Image (spheres, rainbow, N blue to C red):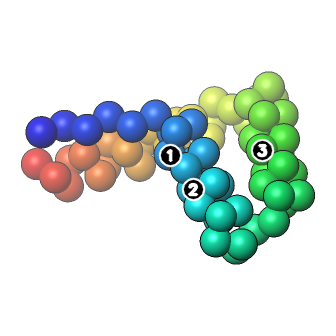
Amino acid sequence: MILNISAVLLFGAASALAVRTRSAGGGAALVLFLFGFFTAGTGAYEPIHNLVQASADALTALGN
């Protein structure tokens, strides 16, 4: 069984968990969200996306 999870959903859930367990406050969560939002609009998007994609492919290959 293959389970596909969006990176946005995964990181959103991790952020919500961090705020819920008080590992990070609401202000920190907002700063991290804005950082990610503005990073997506820069030239850093493509290398970051390629790194995450390569990591996901490597994890998938480990499962086979």
Find residue 58 and report its horizontal and vertical position in percent.
Answer: 31, 49
Say which amino acid is labelled 2: Ala
Count of numbered tags: 3
Q: Residues within 10 Å of mark 2 (few under 14, many from 20)?
A: few
Q: Which residue is mark 3?
A: 33
> Residue placed farthest to the top in the image?
41
Identify the residue at image location x=62%, y=37%.
47
Q: Which mark is residue 10?
A: 1
Q: Which mark is residue 14?
A: 2
Instruction: Examine the image and state in which quarter residue 28 appears.
Output: bottom right
Question: Which label's residue is closer to the chain start, 1 or 3?
Answer: 1
Instruction: Examine the image and state in which quarter residue 19 appears.
Output: bottom right
C-alpha separation, residue under disc 1 versus residue under disc 3: 13 Å
Secondary structure beneath label 3: helix
Identify the residue at image location x=12%, y=39%.
1
Identify the residue at image location x=32%, y=34%.
4
Find residue 43 and report its horizontal and vertical position in percent.
Answer: 77, 29
Q: Are marks 2 and 1 in contact (CB under 8 Å)?
A: yes
Find residue 21 and report its horizontal and vertical position in percent.
Answer: 64, 71
Secondary structure beneath label 1: helix
Q: Residues within 10 Å of mark 1 (few under 14, many from 20)?
A: few
Left or right, 63 with respect to 7, comes to left
Say which amino acid is labelled 3: Phe
Question: Which label's residue is closer to the chain start, 2 or 3?
Answer: 2
Instruction: Examine the image and state in which quarter residue 42 appears.
Output: top right
